[in-house]
Image: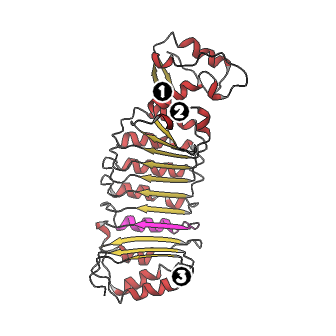
Amino acid sequence: QQDYALSDMSKSCCAFFENITKQISEFNLHGSQSNSQELQTIQKKPFQEGQSNSQIPGIDPILNLIQNELCIELSKERQALTLQLFTEVEEECQIKSIDQLHSITELTISGNKKYQGGSISAFSLFLHQIPNVETLNLSFSNSGIQDEYFIKVLSKLPMLTEIKILNIDLSKSEFLKDKSLEQIARVLKSLPKLVQLDVNFQDCDGFSELGILAFLQIFPEITKLEVLSLDFEGLKSFTRDELKFLLGGLSKLNRLQSLSLNFQGCSKIETSVIKVLSKRLKISSPRLTNFKLLLNKFKTNNPIFVNFTKQLSFKKATSFSLSLTDSADLSDKWLESLAEQIGEMTSLTNLYLSFAECPRLG
């Protein structure tokens, strides 16, 4: 058993690989385990000056270890990768050389089976080979992934310092708990170039009120955000306190150009959501041109609703979406103030309004 750093791909490194392949039965590369049969796949060509990394003996074994433990799909454009945990990848979509990884600008990590952590060591090695990723998609909707292993995945992400766009879909991931939310907040702090964030926590029943608060505390600190989408639909632990905290954080984001909020099915804020929004929805960004808000089953009265609509005075908006569905309180009269605010949005090119299942509307 030996430890050997592979950062310097030199003649000695190649010679080392050629010498050990017949002498040992097990080899751990940055924690990625491979057996002797796999090690025999190392190329035996003599090293020649001027060879590219993908041709040097010792590089391809790194790729083999990554490919064997992490199923990676390369897009046809050769600029996007999909990492699917414990699934199979078609031959034409497999990575053929390390050089291909260096040009990757978009990475999708997904898993639709129960993640057991066997790939995490190779995952760390893999991330070192894709330093230029600018868009990262974490897609674990209904995946069964648990805290312990999801946190391990998240802990490796700060090495991707070029990330500008981060999309996190954890909808219906019933086994995730508060520790995952805390780790997500740490990751967000470590991404200095992040300008776009899309988070989906729909029907994540494992999150408590304290966990949600831990996540929301990050927003006053990531002030470079230009695009933000937060989906809390069906989140039973989202309360009035969390809503106030969130709105306080949003008021600090003075570069926002697009904001999307979904509170549908958040049963604990049905009686207070309009009142809280009417007092605290204060977007300081003069650049906001795209706004979307989804609510349902809310309760309010006329003065509060009028105050709420005044907070929707985004005169420079080019896109405005508002869904106020399934509310017994919403009436024709109460919509007059909303109509006035929309009438002042003279730059609108996209307008979406939904008042489905509001029985008092004529």
- Out of 126 and 158, give the one closest to the viewer: 126
Q: Is residue 152 above or below residue 229?
A: above
Task: Compare residues 38 and 154 and report the one nearer the observer.
Answer: 38
Q: Secondary structure at mark 2?
A: helix
Proximity of marks 2 and 1: CB atoms separated by less than 8 Å = yes
The reply, left or right, for residue 324 in relation to residue 198 is left
The stretch in magenta equals: 239-262
Q: Residue at x 43, y 66 (%)?
A: 261
Please give the label number shown on residue 31: 1
Image mark for residue 125? 2
Q: Based on the displayed image, in which of its 4 quarters is residue 98 positioned?
A: top right
Q: Is residue 78 visible?
A: yes
Q: Earlier in the sequence, mark 2 or mark 3?
A: 2
Residue 345 — which label?
3
In terms of sequence position, does the residue under pointer 3 or pointer 1 come before the other?
Answer: 1
Element marked by disc 3: loop
Q: Position of residue 45 (x, y in %)?
A: 63, 16
Establish if 57 lies above or below 305: above
Identity of the residue drawn at 53% across and 67% down: 258
In the picture, measured across the screen, residue 96 lies left or right of residue 150, that is: right
Queried whether the magenta region covers residue 165, the answer comes back as no
> Earlier along the polypeptide chain: callout 2 or callout 1?
1
Query: What's the amino acid at mark 1?
Result: Gly
Q: Quadrant of residue 78?
A: top right
